Image: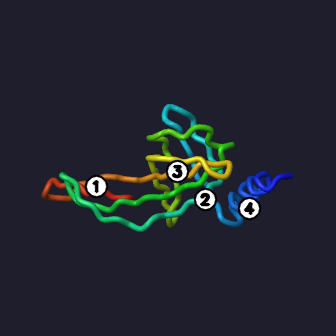
């Protein structure tokens, strides 16, 4: 077995094991069917932002998935990730192939009306 094959095997057997590093996510391609599998999720630091219709927080997550589970990621695909007991939907922005899988850069945004002033806050969560 080559070193490359050993590393790719370790990615699946160790890194994508929910008893070790991974967590369960649900991936839904645009126009496709949802599937649930293990992925490594890394949350990036929170960013505050302003838009023309309000202010809010931008949450980003880097998600590593096995290419056996996601054959061809696309912008707008959805990833449901549970944070603190609540499931949030992230949208895939960009991706790169690596180590027999995909590294997906994803964001989540929701809008909330503020009472009285008609402004909306976009939040990641």
Label 4 sits on a secondary structure element that is helix
User: On the rendered structure, is 23 left or right of 86?
Assistant: right
Query: Between disc 3 and disc 2, whose residue precedes?
Result: 2
Q: Residue at x 51, y 47 (%)?
A: 95
Determine which of the numbered discs, if any, sits on residue 40 in the image: 2
Query: Between disc 1 and disc 2, whose residue precedes?
Result: 2
Q: Residue at x 49, y 56 (%)?
A: 87
Q: Residue at x 75, y 57 (%)?
A: 7
At label 1, counting other C-alpha atoms closer than 10 Å, the crowd grade (few under 14, some 14-19, many 20 or more) is few
Which label lies toward us, 4 or 1? 4
Q: CA distance from mark 4 to mark 1?
A: 40 Å
Residue furthest toward the top?
31
Query: Between disc 4 and disc 2, whose residue precedes?
Result: 4
**Disc 3: which residue:** 104
Determine which of the numbered discs, if any, sits on residue 14 in the image: 4
Compared with 31, 73 (above or below) is: below
Compared with 14, 25 (above or below) is: above
């Amino acid at each position: 077995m080559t070193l490359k094959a050993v590393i790719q095997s370790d990615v699946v057997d160790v890194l994508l094991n929910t008893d070790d590093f991974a967590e369960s996510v649900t991936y839904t391609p645009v126009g496709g069917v949802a599937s649930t599998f293990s992925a490594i999720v890394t949350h990036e630091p929170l960013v505050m932002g302003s838009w023309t219709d309000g202010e809010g927080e931008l949450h980003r997550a880097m998600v590593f998935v096995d290419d056996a589970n996601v054959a061809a990621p696309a912008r707008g695909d959805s990833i449901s990730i549970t944070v603190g007991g609540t499931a949030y939907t992230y949208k895939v922005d960009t991706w790169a192939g690596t180590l027999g899988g995909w590294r997906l850069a994803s964001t989540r945004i929701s809008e909330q009306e503020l009472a009285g002033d008609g402004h909306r806050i976009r939040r990641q969560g």
